[in-house]
């Protein structure tokens, strides 16, 4: 085993390799700011959900045909308030023929009119019973 191979093994054991890979992806995806040149017809925007006003901002952005990635982490310690706001957003996207889906526990995707999200059901594990 070469010294480089040994270091790679230690990095994998200690988790350093994953951290480096994540950091590399962040560097790769770095943008040159929020300037879009030339301007686009529609945008994908991130909104931090801290209160009802941020929910209204998401609705306004959907009205201008933008796609929203909603970070719900700021309200994670207020589950009832979070559920109320998300319920209103779900109702709104339904009324405008948009869509809503959970990306992760902290991120929700909202789409404007006539933009649908392809949702897949989790696959059953071998030998599992599926109840409909």
Image: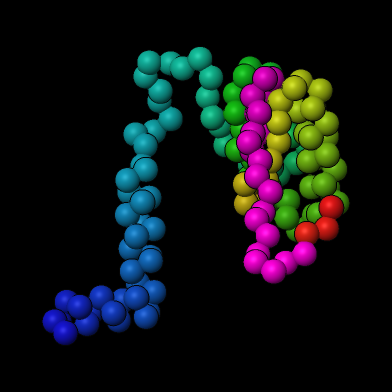
Query: Closest to the observer: 72 or 15?
Result: 15
Residue 88 visible to the viewer: yes
How many numbered marks are there? 0
Task: Determine the residue positioned at 32% across, 49% down.
Answer: 27
Asked if 66 appears above or below 11 in the picture, the reply is above
Asked if 38 appears above or below 89 in the picture, the reply is above
Q: Main secondary structure of the magenta part?
A: loop
Task: State yes or no: residue 15 in magenta.
Answer: no
| Residue 124 position within the rendered picture, expressed as x and y whole percent measured from the top left | 68, 60
Task: Determine the residue positioned at 76% across, 20% down.
Answer: 96
* Identity of the residue furthest to the front in this view: 127
Range of magenta residues: 108-129
| Residue 11 position within the rendered picture, expressed as x and y whole percent measured from the top left | 31, 76
Is 34 positioned to the left or the right of 54 in the image?
A: left
* Identity of the residue furthest to the bottom in this view: 1
Task: Determine the residue positioned at 35% across, 72% down.
Answer: 16
Task: Determine the residue positioned at 73% across, 51% down.
Answer: 75
Q: Quarter-wise, where is residue 88 in the image? A: top right
Query: Closest to the observer: 21 or 82?
Result: 21
| Residue 105 position within the rendered picture, expressed as x and y whole percent measured from the top left | 66, 54
Residue 62 visible to the viewer: no
């Amino acid at each position: 085993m070469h010294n480089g191979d040994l270091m790679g093994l230690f990095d994998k054991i200690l988790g350093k390799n994953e951290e480096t890979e994540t950091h590399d992806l962040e560097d790769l995806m770095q943008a040159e700011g929020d300037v879009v040149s030339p301007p686009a017809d529609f945008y994908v925007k991130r909104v931090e959900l801290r209160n009802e006003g941020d929910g209204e901002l998401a609705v306004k952005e959907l009205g201008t045909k933008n796609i929203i990635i909603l970070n719900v982490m700021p309200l994670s310690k207020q589950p009832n308030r979070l559920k109320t706001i998300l319920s209103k957003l779900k109702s709104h996207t339904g009324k405008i023929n948009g869509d809503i889906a959970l990306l992760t526990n902290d991120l929700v995707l909202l789409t404007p009119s006539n933009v649908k999200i392809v949702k897949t059901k989790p696959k059953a594990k071998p030998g599992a019973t599926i109840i409909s």
